[in-house]
Image (spheres, rainbow, N blue to C red):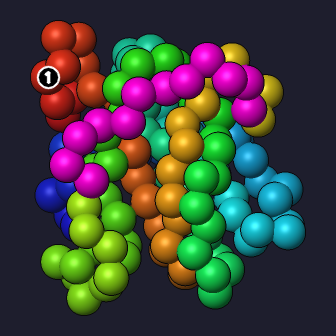
Amino acid sequence: LNQFYVEQGALWYHSFTHHGFEWISGDDVQNSVVCFARKGKNKTDLVVVVCHFGPEELKEYRIGVPISGKWREALHSDDQRFGGQTKPLSAPLTTEKEASHGREQSLVITLAPLSVQVYVLEGKNGKKKV
């Protein structure tokens, strides 16, 4: 977890200013979901964090994201490697041109119960952004 934190500059680059944080959704009381973006040094240095506090799996949950492109699931608290039930996603998710949470593009994801998922924007040419 510490290595992941160090590798994702968006999680710490603007730690002491408001420039590094952006709410995506903090009011989905019905589904017990909050999501936010952390921003790094560059416009494309982004991490989207989705926290699901409910006891049921949510399928086809749509979240608005700040930038269109391919988003890789970088961390999932319910991953089988950590004793959970979820297999990691093998392919990145591509944004859809459907507005959500005040953004022009969105992702559709499945939220495991009581989980946190972290998505990172992949770099150009399909390379993983570190």
The C terminus - image quarter: top left
Query: Which class describes the residues within 10 Å of circle 1: few (<14), some (14-19), or many (20+)?
Result: few
From the viewer's side, name the closer residue of 87 and 122: 87
The residue at which mark 1 appears reads as 127
The quadrant of the picture occupied by the N terminus is bottom left
Residue 51 relative to residue 76: left or right: right
> Is residue 130 one of those drawn in magenta?
no
Q: Position of residue 116 (x, y in %)?
A: 47, 67
Q: Residue furthest front?
A: 59
Q: Is residue 66 visible?
A: no
Task: Give the residue at x 25% y 61%.
Answer: 88
Q: Quadrant of residue 42?
A: top left
The x and y percentages for residue 17 are 58, 36
Of the pair 119 and 7, the residue shown nearer to us: 119
Residue 83 seen by the camera? yes
Secondary structure type for disc 1:
loop
Q: Residue at x 57, y 75 (%)?
A: 57
Q: Residue at x 77, y 54 (%)?
A: 26
Q: Residue 18, position in %: x, y? A: 64, 35
Q: Quadrant of residue 13?
A: top left
Magenta segment: 89-100
* 121 relative to 35 in the view: left or right: left
Which is the main secondary structure of the residues drawn in magenta?
loop
89 to the left or right of 24:
left
Along the viewing direction, whichever of 92 and 75 lies nearer the viewer: 92
- Residue depicted at x 55% and y 24%: 96
Find residue 119 and report its image quarter.
top left
Q: Is residue 93 magenta?
A: yes
Amino acid residing under circle 1:
Lys
